[in-house]
Every structure is written in structure tokens, then in C-alpha cells.
Image (tube, helix red, strand yellow):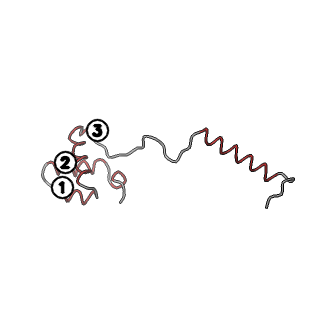
Amino acid sequence: MKQLHKKFTNSQVKALITRYLKKEIERKYIQEILGIKKTRFFALVKQLKEDPGHFSISYSRKITTRKISQDIERNIVKELKIEKDLIKNKDIPIK
């Protein structure tokens, strides 16, 4: 299942939920269209009711993923340089 913010724009979701609040469309049909469950649906309804002007389904991570700290990266580079020097050294036979 794709993420909601990748399938729909903010205005599309806002329009669907607004139509639900006006009782023009039933909840189960909107859930099918959006591909979400009941809990997520009502979380979006709550978000829209609380602040309709700033309603957004966009998603951004709070911390970056797949990133290592600078200390660990420096240590890895240092160890790789040591291994590279061992490989390049003609006096040490490596097979």
C-alpha cells in the first residue's frame, strides 16, 4: 500500500473529508478511495476540524535515516586506510 501523501494531494483529501462532514459521502467509501483504516480516517477528520487552514497530509521525517555519525565514519575510513596499506605493502604476502 502506498503512502497517502504520495497518492493524493492535500486538497483532494480535504475535499473528500469535507464531503463526509456534509454527509454527502459515507465514511466507508472514502476509506476505500483513500486506502486507509477507520482510525487514520478519524485522525484526518480531527485534524481538518481543528485547523482547516493548515490541513496537510504531507510527511517529513524528524531525523535522517541511514546515516552514521561522523566519529564512526572517520573510524571506518581509518580502518580502511590501514587495510589498504596492508594490501599495497609488497613485503606482506596476501592471498
- The x and y percentages for residue 92 are 84, 54
- The residue located at (83%, 57%) in the rendering is 93
Residue 33 location, quadrant: bottom left
Task: In this rendered view, identify the residue nearer to me: 74 or 14.
Answer: 74
Q: Is mark 1 on a helix, strand or loop?
A: helix
Q: What element carries label 3?
A: helix
- The residue located at (31%, 43%) in the rendering is 56
Determine which of the numbered discs, if any, sits on residue 54 in the image.
Answer: 3
Determine which of the numbered discs, if any, sits on residue 27 in the image.
Answer: 1
- The residue located at (70%, 43%) in the rendering is 78
Question: Measured along the vertical axis of the image, is residue 16 above or below residue 48?
Answer: below
Question: Measured along the vertical axis of the image, is residue 48 above or below residue 29?
Answer: above
Task: In this rendered view, identify the residue nearer to me: 66 or 7.
Answer: 66
Q: What element carries label 2?
A: helix
Question: Looking at the picture, which amino acid does disc 2 mark?
Answer: Thr
Closer to the eye: label 2 or 1: 1
Question: Looking at the picture, which amino acid does disc 1 mark?
Answer: Arg
Gap in angstroms between the C-alphas marked 3 and 2? 14 Å
Q: What residue is disc 2 on?
A: 18
